[in-house]
Amino acid sequence: MSSVTPGHIMQVGMGFWASKTLLSAVELGVFSTLAGGPADLPTLQKKLALHPRAARDFLDALVALKLLERDAGIYRNTAETDLFLDRAKPSYIGGVMEMANARLYRFWGSLTEALRTGELQNEGKGGEDFFTALYSDPVRLRGFLSAMSGISAGAAQAIAGKFPWRDYKTFMDVGSAQGMVPATLASAHPHLTGIGFDLPVVKPVFEEFIAQRGVADRVRFHGGNFFADTLPQVDVIVMGHILHDWDLAEKKTLLRKAFDALPKGGAVIAYDAIIDDDRRENAFGLLMSLNMLIETSGGFDYTGADCRAWMGEVGFSRTRVEPLAGPDSMVIGFK
């Protein structure tokens, strides 16, 4: 009898069931509620305002998905959900889950149309630029910037530990959003001073976050447009989850601007969900590239070999790829 089964097909094909269960749990505050202490079904049903028909299956589905634990009828967070999905903790990464729930989940319903037309499917579908629309709405902007912190937290810690910061004094994070990368680098390396570069409207959100992290004396905000404006001169330029937003010509333009702003011996760090060179293993990176199809007019993710070639074209003399956290890797170019 054949050992081939449809199990994997079913798991992938119906994977949105599990995704939406997690996203709704974040929206409802399940993990933040349980961070205050374990609770039984009636207590959680009341606190989360769950209908009796739904509550038990919903919570037990989270148990089966290894997102909650249950012992003698008492529910509690796992170590991971307690650390990363409790809104009260600085390690919270739920912002990206909140954005996925509020925006991406419905936009990905139009993936087939995007694959056939090559056109984005988000708020900009009617012709309005996505970033213009996003940055003009203070509430949505704060949510987006928080999401960027969540998706960058692990990579920021890895960059702080893996890059030879002892050899440099200044850095700039281009497209810094809320400021997770600058805050992490400055906290880990007291000798560093840094800049967060983003559109001027981001300034109050950035400065609030940096102050909360206790590094406002060494990290400042610089408002500008990284295509239109000259980049400030620093020893190291970081571009995290930036290059994949843009088409090939724009990617090279940003790398060229970084090269021009750096001194001899300086470095650029570009990190994204870098696709493996054989394009077989990093499924997240390939799916992220499809997300760029949904979200942008020309963006796409790329392999380490791709990025190293672009860096070489604009003048960087040495390049290398290093893995970071999860699906992210960094491509480093030295001038």
Image: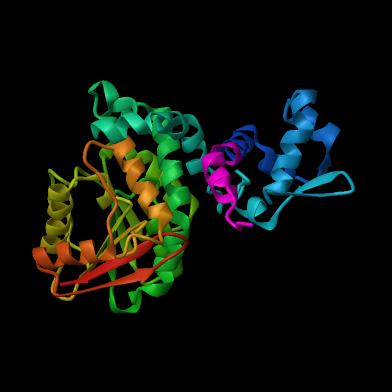
Q: Residue at x 47, y 59 (%)?
A: 154
Specify whether residue 13 is painted magenta: yes
Q: Is residue 119 visible?
A: no
User: Is 173 placed above or below 35 here?
Assistant: below
Q: Is residue 282 left or right of residue 238?
A: right
User: In the current view of this chain or complex, which residue is farthest to the top?
Assistant: 126
Instruction: Give percent across and percent down for residue 9.
Output: 53, 46
Is 294 positioned to the left or the right of 228 in the image? Answer: right
Quarter that holds the C terminus: bottom left
Q: With respect to residue 78, does 115 lie above or below?
A: above
Q: Nearer the viewer, residue 74 or 64?
A: 64
Q: Quadrant of residue 34?
A: top right
Coordinates of residue 21 in the picture (x, y in percent): 62, 37
Say which of 198 and 246 sits in front.
Answer: 246
Q: Residue furthest right?
A: 72
Residue interval drawn in magenta: 1-18
As for residue 327 lying within the magenta part, the answer is: no
Q: Quadrant of the N terminus?
A: bottom right
Task: Report which quarter residue 304 is drawn in.
Answer: bottom left
Q: Is residue 246 above or below residue 154?
A: above
Residue at left 34%, top 78%? 166
Q: Is residue 213 left or right of residue 273?
A: right
Along the horizontal axis of the image, is 117 left or right of 87?
A: left
Is residue 61 in sight in this rendering? Answer: yes
Q: Residue at x 41, y 46 (%)?
A: 148
Main SS of the magenta segment?
A: helix
- Which colouring convention does the figure follow? rainbow
Q: Position of residue 282 (x, y in %)?
A: 40, 59
